[in-house]
Image (cartoon, rainbow, N blue to C red):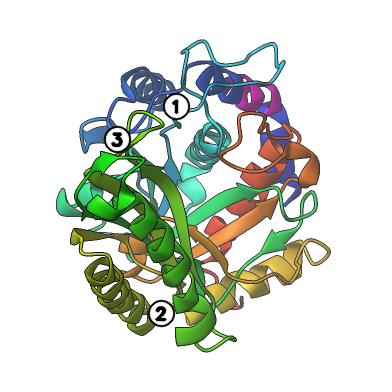
């Protein structure tokens, strides 16, 4: 452990420098060309062979002496958010920002790759360093990576997220579901427009939409067991152009989050049933488009228990209790294929909420995460843990 700590200490400034570089040049899904080139140049410098996958993804491979291969994944995409921090290294790409910590995730995985490359002769496991594009929005980069065979020879896979809702250096490793499915729905309501002074001559889609939104909120409160986690939220409603004209059409867009496939399907069915009834009441026609983006992210219980034991041995003060969150993560597609564990690394509330224009990470967490995750990786082949 002391040798590992020293190795991380030696590259601490590099890790922070990498993070700042990626923060300055955020790119959205499947457009991470500059990000990808930087990752490739560093892996080449570390003498780690790599391949480009899924257009902008990069997969490094480090061969140890054993037959088992462990994958560790970082997402690399940013968000279409205008940064409002005063950081000296704030985004130089107007309208885009690393508002979810993926810039830190990339720097962490590069740090892990660098440290492990210097221990190559002593490794009893093979490692794949998976830098994955397009986590934030469909189409999923994880699905594309899987389709291109990235995990065909991987026995298990690790994922991680820097998390502001946990105190600094606290770790949560859940067993079973840890993150929700991420679904979207779009409802188009077609009515009959007209002059705002003569609403009785219209089939008002705006009034219909108002009743519909209120009614759909009762799915969670009245159709689902109160102890079952689920969310129905609306992100956009649009229709009309001027104050005195009732439009012909209104569009509503929202999201559904659950931790269960059965509840996921039940909510989808209820959305369609309630939409039909409300629109019929107002004499409107409708279309419902429901898209299942990523499934529930489920940690393998046996793998998670092993990681908890390693953590208890080397970082006992860092373990904490938390609960599954209703955010979505396309890492879930890996968890459907092979044993996986997705863990959360606390940064503290001062970092702000993810997906916010003022979000920033505490750089001190980066070397800690490199050290911690490398400790986990090199001990996963240890039968005593």
Q: Position of residue 51 (x, y in %)?
A: 24, 34
Q: Does 129 appear above or below 97?
A: below
Residue 111's image quarter?
Answer: top right
Would residue 35 be counted in the magenta stretch? no
Q: CA distance from mark 2 to mark 3?
A: 30 Å
For residue 345, side relative to residue 279 (left or right)? right
Q: Which badge, 3 or 1, is on the more N-terminal residue?
A: 1
Q: Which badge, 2 or 3, is on the more N-terminal residue?
A: 3
Residue at image x 83%, y 64%? 317
Q: Position of residue 17 (x, y in %)?
A: 62, 19
Q: Secondary structure at mark 3?
A: strand
Q: CA distance from mark 3 to mark 1?
A: 18 Å
The part of the chain drawn in magenta is 12-17
Would residue 13 be counted in the magenta stretch? yes
Residue at image x 50%, y 27%? 81
Q: Secondary structure at mark 2?
A: loop
Mark 2 residue crowding within 10 angstroms, few (<14) / some (14–19) / many (20+): some
Q: Secondary structure at mark 1?
A: loop
Residue placed most toward the observer, 248 or 99: 248
Q: Position of residue 37 (x, y in %)?
A: 34, 19
Q: Which residue is mark 2?
A: 260
Q: Is residue 160 visible?
A: yes
Q: Which badge, 1 or 2, is on the more N-terminal residue?
A: 1
Q: Which residue is mark 1?
A: 46
Q: CA distance from mark 1 to mark 2?
A: 42 Å
Tell me the number on the disc at residue 57: 3
């Amino acid at each position: 452990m002391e040798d590992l700590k020293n190795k991380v200490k030696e590259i601490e400034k590099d890790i922070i420098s990498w993070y700042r570089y990626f923060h300055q040049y955020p790119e959205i899904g499947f457009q991470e060309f500059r990000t990808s080139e930087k990752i490739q140049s560093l892996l080449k410098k570390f003498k780690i062979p790599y391949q480009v996958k899924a257009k902008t993804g990069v997969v490094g491979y480090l061969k140890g002496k054993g037959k088992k291969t462990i994958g560790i994944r970082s997402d690399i995409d940013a968000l279409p958010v205008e940064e409002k921090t005063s950081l000296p290294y704030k985004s130089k790409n107007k309208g885009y920002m690393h508002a979810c910590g993926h810039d830190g995730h990339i720097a962490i995985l590069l740090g892990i790759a660098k440290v492990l490359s210097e221990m190559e002769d002593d490794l009893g496991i093979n490692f794949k360093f998976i830098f994955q594009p397009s986590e934030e929005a469909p189409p999923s980069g994880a699905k594309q990576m899987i389709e291109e065979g990235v995990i065909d020879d991987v026995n298990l896979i690790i994922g991680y997220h820097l998390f502001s809702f946990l105190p600094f250096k606290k770790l949560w490793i859940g067993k079973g579901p840890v993150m929700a499915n991420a679904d979207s729905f779009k409802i188009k309501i077609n009515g009959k427009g007209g002059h705002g002074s003569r609403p009785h001559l219209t089939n008002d889609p705006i009034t219909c939409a108002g009743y519909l939104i209120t009614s759909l909120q009762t799915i969670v409160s009245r159709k689902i067991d109160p102890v079952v986690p689920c969310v129905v939220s609306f992100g956009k409603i649009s229709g009309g152009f001027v104050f005195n004209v009732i439009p012909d059409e209104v569009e509503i867009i929202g999201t559904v989050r659950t931790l269960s496939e059965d509840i996921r399907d039940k909510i989808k069915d209820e959305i369609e049933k309630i939409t039909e009834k409300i629109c019929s009441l107002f004499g409107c026609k409708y279309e419902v488009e429901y898209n299942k983006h990523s499934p529930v992210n489920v940690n393998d219980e046996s793998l998670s228990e092993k990681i908890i034991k390693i953590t208890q041995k080397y970082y006992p003060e860092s373990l904490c209790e938390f609960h599954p969150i209703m955010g979505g993560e396309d890492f879930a597609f890996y968890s459907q294929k092979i044993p996986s564990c997705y863990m959360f690394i606390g940064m503290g509330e001062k970092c702000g909420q993810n997906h916010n224009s003022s979000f920033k990470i505490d750089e001190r967490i980066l070397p800690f995460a490199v050290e911690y995750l490398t400790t986990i990786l090199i001990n996963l082949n240890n039968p005593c843990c």
